[in-house]
Image: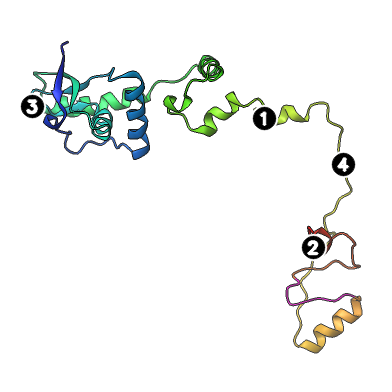
Amino acid sequence: MNVEESKLNKLLPYKNNPRKHTEKQVAQIAESISEFGFVNPILVDDKHMILAGHGRYLAAQKLDLKTVPVVMVKDLTEDQKKALVIADNKIAMNSTWDENLLWEQIRQLNEKGFNLDLLAFDEMEILPMTDPNTVIDPLAEWEDMPEYSQEDQLAFKTIYVHFKNAEDYKNFQEFIGQTMTDKTKSIWYPEQKNMDTESKRYE
């Protein structure tokens, strides 16, 4: 397998490539190339059509590179090329992480001040492993906490009352000894203290 340098403008993206690259991912690839170099060549056929490495190709454009390393694959049929484009992306997606090793290595890099953005993880994915104040196991936070209980606050029975006119509405308020407004959606009878929104209002 020979790695060659090719002019970037000589490469041709594969037509109808089913794998899409977002601007965010291309930016991540570009940052990786800037930090580590172009360590993964682009795979092309004998006509310089890209078979694998479209993301790296777009990142090279973003970095305004003039040349990139390529590996030329010859003697593939058109069907084999189509299959290779799909397989190269899908096979990479089929791998998994050893979570313990992964996060331990990320913690080590973080302790040494390494730029974790280069790892291409979202901030919220890495935060639990780098911030000692982040709660990883919410249930563990309740260990040794005292038991909490309160009386049942649910209503025994709820009914809807309909009024034919404003006078009936006013009479009902007087009968139960409570005042309602146009915004009132429900009431307790008899009136319950601390069950109204006013008592829960923040100053």
Number of the label disc, if any, that sits on residue 197: 2
- Where residue 51 sits, quadrant-wise, is top left
Residue interval drawn in magenta: 178-184
Mark in the foreground, 2 or 4 = 2
- What residue is shown with label 1? 135
Whole-Å distance between the Cαs marked 1 and 2? 32 Å
Whole-Å distance between the Cαs marked 3 and 4? 74 Å
Mark 2 or 3 closer to N-term?
3
- What residue is shown with label 4? 149
- Where residue 117 sits, quadrant-wise, is top left
Q: Which amino acid does label 3 sit on?
A: Lys
Rendered location of residue 93, percent (x, y): 37, 26
Numbered disc 2: secondary structure: loop
Mark 1 or 2 closer to N-term?
1
Q: In which quarter of the image is the C terminus?
A: bottom right
Rendered location of residue 56, percent (x, y): 27, 28
Image label count: 4
Q: What residue type is labelled 2?
A: Thr
